[in-house]
Image (cartoon, rainbow, N blue to C red):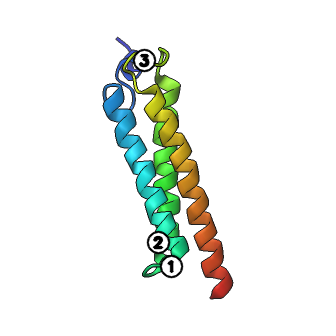
């Protein structure tokens, strides 16, 4: 059994839905951190790079899980959760970039 077979069978972060859900939660955390940074609750300047980093991590992990799933929707491999993770990761990166641009403009 090759490494590709193992990754395709279990995905990057575990078996099916569990891995995709974990990656979607990482991406959701980036959206929350980015939203707080844009609202400037606390220190928006410190949260913006964090939202960018967490968003990129969630995006990459979700995209790799999506690329390694071999079946369609409804099979339990977490394809829909990976798509949600990719979308949330993109939103988190966007919010982090917006907050970073705002913090540099006012500094």
- Nearer the viewer's eye, disc 2 or disc 1? 1
Is 89 situated above or below 12?
below
Q: Are marks 2 and 1 in contact (CB under 8 Å)?
A: no
Q: Residue furthest top?
A: 1
Please indicate, yes or no, whether residue 13 appears anywhere in the rendered image: no
Q: Is residue 102 left or right of residue 74?
A: right
Residue 83 position in % (x across, y down): 52, 34
Residue named by callout 1: 40
Alpha carbon separation for disc pair 1 and 3: 40 Å
Alpha carbon separation for disc pair 2 and 1: 9 Å
Residue 42 position in % (x across, y down): 42, 81
Q: Residue at x 58, y 71 (%)?
A: 99
Residue 46 position in % (x across, y down): 47, 76
Q: Residue at x 47, y 14 (%)?
A: 71
Alpha carbon separation for disc pair 2 and 3: 37 Å
Give the class, few, some or many, for how many residues have Cα within 10 Å of label 3's Cα (few <14, many ≥20): few
Q: In which quadrant will I find the C terminus?
A: bottom right
Is 47 situated above or below 79?
below
Quadrant of the rendered image containing residue 6:
top left
Residue 8 position in % (x across, y down): 42, 19
Q: In the drawing, what numbered circle is on residue 106? A: none
Is 43 situated above or below 93?
below
Residue named by callout 2: 47
Q: Residue at x 52, y 70 (%)?
A: 48
Residue named by callout 3: 74
Is 32 situated above or below 104?
above
């Amino acid at each position: 059994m090759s490494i590709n077979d193992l990754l395709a069978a279990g995905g990057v972060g575990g078996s099916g839905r569990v891995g995709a859900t974990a990656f979607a939660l990482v991406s959701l955390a980036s959206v929350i951190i980015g939203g707080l940074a844009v609202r400037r609750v606390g220190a928006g300047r410190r949260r913006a790079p964090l939202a960018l980093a967490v968003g990129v991590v969630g995006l990459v992990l979700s995209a790799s899980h999506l690329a390694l799933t071999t079946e369609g929707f409804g099979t339990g491999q977490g394809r829909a959760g990976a798509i949600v993770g990719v979308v949330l990761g993109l939103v988190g990166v966007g919010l982090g970039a917006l907050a970073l641009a705002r913090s540099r403009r006012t500094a």
